Image (tube, helix red, strand yellow):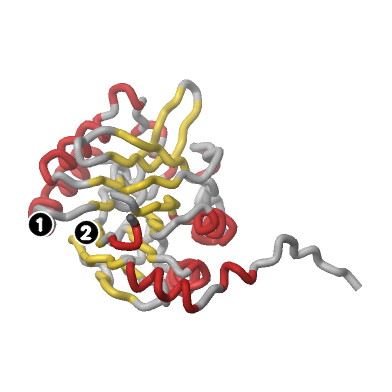
Amino acid sequence: MGQEKNLNISAIQMCSKVGDKKTNFEKVSQLIKRDVNQGVDIIILPEVWTVGWSPRHFRESAEEIQNSETIKLLSNIAKEYNSWIIGGSFILKDGEHYYNTCPVLNRRGELVALYSKNHLFSYYGSDEGKFVETGSHPVMVDIDGVKTGLTICYDIRFPEIYRAYRKAGADLFINCAAWGLNKPIPWECMTRCRAVENQTYMVALTQSGYIENGEWNIGHSRIIDYKGETISEIKDQKEGAFSACLDFSPMYEFRNKCTCMSDIKKSYEVEVL
């Protein structure tokens, strides 16, 4: 089924106001209303769009899944647009535990999956690991026959999680991020590499704009094909949707011609001399 499937994707690049969920909810709704057309198959949001990239604000913004206002908002959008929603991430409270979590909702507005960030960024003054815990495992979702592997921001530095998705049958990777402006080369290179080395479409979506304390998001989001070509993008600090129609048939044809995955060895034990 996936071999014959096309998916129309719209992703929202935005600048969140730190610690202000109400303003961020209103902005998401306005940007989707302004830029997203009816008939889109998937709407994607960036990491921690609800609260902005400020770990010290994470816990005060946290929501329990049973009464999550973020899930309620996304559910209404999914039903209005008859679209799947990859909800970027919000801070999930589960008992005494907190997670940076991506919700996935189907076209009926039903919550079908939660992926919690597997790798937490706690370097160069960031302290995400002090406020949230790591997720326990990767999560892949079947979206209208297309197996979709979910990751969040710093996960991009770990090719192992993407290779695990590819081995499990992934045709599409999504990385929802709030990536810093001062790390352009890793963002540009690693998002492209994850697509190329796995022969898989990649949506690399990050926030844009000012954060706080002199920090900025990079604001260059892209949709990359299985050969590493950028097929849609939004640059700099702009806000709004960028879109693409993904055709999976040529991807499968390319995989059949360039059978890299079959050359992977079962073990790469290193001989130390």
Q: Gap between marks 2 and 1, in whole Å?
A: 9 Å
Instruction: Identify which residue is drawn at 16% across, 48% down.
Output: 27
- Give the image quarter of residue 90: top left
Residue 10 - label? 2
Tell me which numbered mark, 2 or 1, is placed earlier along the sequence: 2
- Tag 2–tag 1 contact (CB < 8 Å): yes
Q: Considering depth in this image, is 85 or 145 the residue closer to the camera?
A: 145
For residue 250, above or below residue 205: below
Instruction: Identify which residue is drawn at 38% across, 50% down.
Output: 53
Is residue 137 among the parts visible in the rendering? Answer: yes
Instruction: Identify which residue is drawn at 36% across, 44% down.
Output: 89
Residue lying at the far right of the rendered structure: 273
Instruction: Give the crowd class for mark 1: few <14, some 14-19, many >=20 residues within 10 Å.
Output: few
Q: Considering depth in this image, is 269 or 205 the residue closer to the camera?
A: 269
Residue type indicated by callout 1: Asn
For residue 20, above or below residue 38: above
Residue ID for mark 1: 37
Is residue 183 among the parts visible in the rendering? Answer: no
Residue type indicated by callout 2: Ser
Residue 136 placement (x, y as % from top left): 55, 38
Residue 171 placement (x, y as % from top left): 41, 60
Instruction: Give the crowd class for mark 2: few <14, some 14-19, many >=20 residues within 10 Å.
Output: many
Element at label 1: loop
Q: Considering depth in this image, is 54 or 78 the residue closer to the camera?
A: 78
